[in-house]
Image (spheres, rainbow, N blue to C red):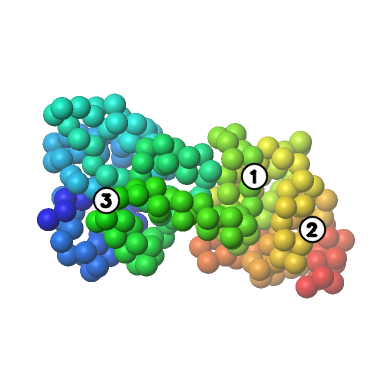
Amino acid sequence: MVRVIIIEDEYSPRRMLREKLEQYSPDMAVVAECENAENALIDILRLRPDLLFLDIQMPGKNGLWLADELMRLKGATFTPPDIVFTTGYIYQEYLLKAFELAAIDYLVKPVSAESLKKAIARYRERAGLTTGLQNLMNAIGEEKLLKFKSYNGIFLLRPDDIAYVKADCDYACMFFANGTKEDVFERLGEIEKKLPHEQFLRAGKSVVVNRKYIRKITDSILQLVTPTAGYTIEISRSAARQLKEKL
């Protein structure tokens, strides 16, 4: 029996991952679920699991901190468990760190059944542990993800991840389809050049929007609706008129 600990700060992803494991890998027993890295470290040392499904982005100490701590504690009396990282976004710095830590795989949430099966297969193989991450790097190249600079480094996105971008002095704020946002250390014009022109439109001088999510345009208001979030943006009459002409 493979002993598993799921480390994820949100209940729904934890539950979904546990249910998928029960369905596709009945020989894997979830011995604990943890909401933060500090509690997870205690449970790992106490329960000695074989495998972790470890969320990278969590309040307080993140998953990379926990992985580093486990490597630091490695010795004659403790062998760190194997790790499958999970995250909501593909960040280059996370990929590089995952390579450094020899993680089995790096799964983007929501974790699909197919990607989970592949990660489990790689765990069972116990050889070529960086194969899954190399496949992901290849997929990044094939998918041509968009790269942007933020305070925390560089992050990569699919066009559909972006709802709209708004200029903020010399920089910009990017609003995502999942309802979150990120400050981007690039001018709006530089960002606009990277975005697919057939998918993104100007809404005045300071806003670029994803036309896929436009639901309503009035003389002063633009409403965007994504599968998980909604945005209301104030725009000028001329911007509203130009948008209507383009759509």
The CA span between labels 2 and 3 is: 50 Å
Most distant residue in the front direction: 127
> Which residue corresponds to the image point at 39% horizontal and 47% vertical from the top-left?
130
* Type of the residue with mark 3: Arg
Identify which residue, 137 or 180, lies in the foreground: 137
94 vs 73: above or below: below
Q: Quadrant of the C terminus?
A: bottom right
Most distant residue in the right direction: 238
Q: Is residue 106 visible?
A: no
* Type of the residue with mark 2: Arg
Which picture quadrant has residue 45? Answer: top left
Crowding at dot 3, Cα within 10 Å, few <14 / some 14-19 / many 20+, comes out as few
> Which residue corresponds to the image point at 33% horizontal and 36% vertical from the top-left?
67
- Which of the two discs, 3 and 1, labels the residue nearer the N terminus? 3
Q: Position of residue 58 (x, y in %)?
A: 39, 41
Classify mark 1: helix, strand or loop: strand
Classify mark 3: helix, strand or loop: loop
Q: Is residue 46 visible?
A: yes
> Which residue corresponds to the image point at 12% horizontal and 56% vertical from the top-left?
1
Tell me the residue that label 1 is attached to.
148
Q: In the displayed structure, does residue 80 sit left or right of residue 56?
A: left
Tell me the residue that label 2 is attached to.
202
The CA span between labels 3 and 1 is: 35 Å
Identify which residue, 113 or 60, lies in the foreground: 113
Please tell me whether mark 2 or mark 1 is closer to you in this view.
Answer: 1
Crowding at dot 1, Cα within 10 Å, few <14 / some 14-19 / many 20+, comes out as some
* Type of the residue with mark 1: Phe
- Which of the two discs, 2 and 1, labels the residue nearer the N terminus? 1
Tell me the residue that label 3 is attached to.
126
Q: Position of residue 240 (x, y in %)?
A: 81, 64
125 vs 247: above or below: above
- Which of the two discs, 2 and 3, labels the residue nearer the N terminus? 3
